[in-house]
Amino acid sequence: MNYITVYFSPTGTAEKSSVSMIEALAEGKEFGRVDLTAYSTRETEKVFSTDDFVVFGTPVYGGRIPKVAAQRFARMRGQQTPCIVTVTYGNRDYDDALLELSDLVQANGFVVQAAAALIGQHTFGQIQVGRPDEDDLKENQQFVKTFLEKAEKNPRKGSVKLSIKGNHPYKAGGKGGMFRPLTADTCIQCGLCVKNCPTGAIDSDCSTIDSGRCISCFRCIRRCPVQAKNMNDSSYLAFAEDFSKKLATRRENEYFLPQK
Ligand SMILES: Cc1cc2nc3c(=O)[nH]c(=O)nc-3n(C[C@H](O)[C@H](O)[C@H](O)COP(=O)(O)O)c2cc1C
Ligand code: SF4
Ligand code: SF4
């Protein structure tokens, strides 16, 4: 079996979650990564076989999977390829995102064997800072261990019955947020933000942002080596403070295994 994780992850939390899952599944063996975050991967196509096992990972945006992530995942094709779907969300809710991801990959030839909705630090404000943390990663390992034990006792080739939370039709969401990062005079024109923006929204001048393309993922802010990309804007800061208070209560990871 080849173990591969396929993810979209602007600020790295969904990547951390899905890598921990694939590591546990591979049990010390090598595993592959298909990182679909970069704009340059928007037309990447891959076909997986029955000898592959895939873990999908993405953040939740407005209770859905980000539209850009959905477009990139749609180019991944399975051939009855087993997989685990995971979404990582910022402690509010994942609403219909996990169900949407499960539906999307099943329609493309993958067989969803298990699923997880996991907590990650929210992109905005100071919410569940540092998550997924050591305890989260241990929980992921325990989940994979239980999954493997179940699979060994009761091997299944075809689809399994999972009760993933969510509704059809899905709620509206997935488009991204309204915040547009600013660029301070301290910018050294290194071009890292231009190169790393998942949607190609930053002009080669390193500061002009195409508002129609930007999804407020804040990857440019996190990747800027001199903290020149920023959201030091009074209305954002007021929102972030209030939002952080509202979402202060810790939520736990949820895991979905076959019922029998
Ligand atoms: C535009 C946008 C919308 C978001 N919507 C939600 C949401 O509906 N529920 C939630 O709990 N977190 C939400 N988040 C937070 C992200 O899901 C969370 O921070 C996630 O861990 C980010 O993943 P990444 O580090 O892989 O980019 C949103 C973040 C952004 C940027
Ligand atoms: S410009 Fe917008 S879409 Fe691009 S990295 Fe920055 S926040 Fe994300
Ligand atoms: S990453 Fe920061 S320093 Fe580099 S070009 Fe972008 S804003 Fe300027």
Image (tube, grey):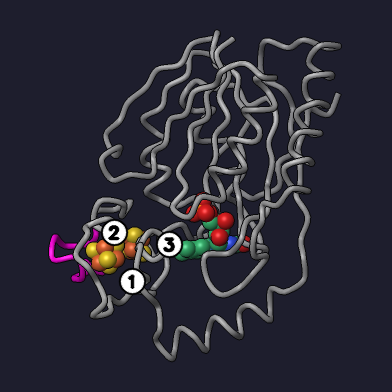
Can you see residue 64? no
Query: Measured from the top left, where is residue 130 in percent x and y?
Result: 64, 59
Mark 1, residue position: 229
Q: Is residue 202 magenta?
A: yes
At 77% from the left edge and 10% from the top edge, which residue is drawn? Answer: 155
Query: Measured from the top left, where is residue 63 in percent x and y?
Result: 57, 58
> What secondary structure is the magenta-colored segment mainly?
loop
First along the sequence among labels 2 and 3: 2
At 13% from the left edge and 66% from the top edge, which residue is drawn? Answer: 205
Can you see residue 158? yes
Quadrant including the N terminus = top right
Q: Which mark is residue 193?
A: 2
- Magenta extent: 201-213
Say which amino acid is labelled 1.
Lys
**Residue 89 figure quarter:** bottom right
In this view, 40 is above or below 198: above
Taking the image as shown, residue 73 lies to the left or right of residue 154, namely: left
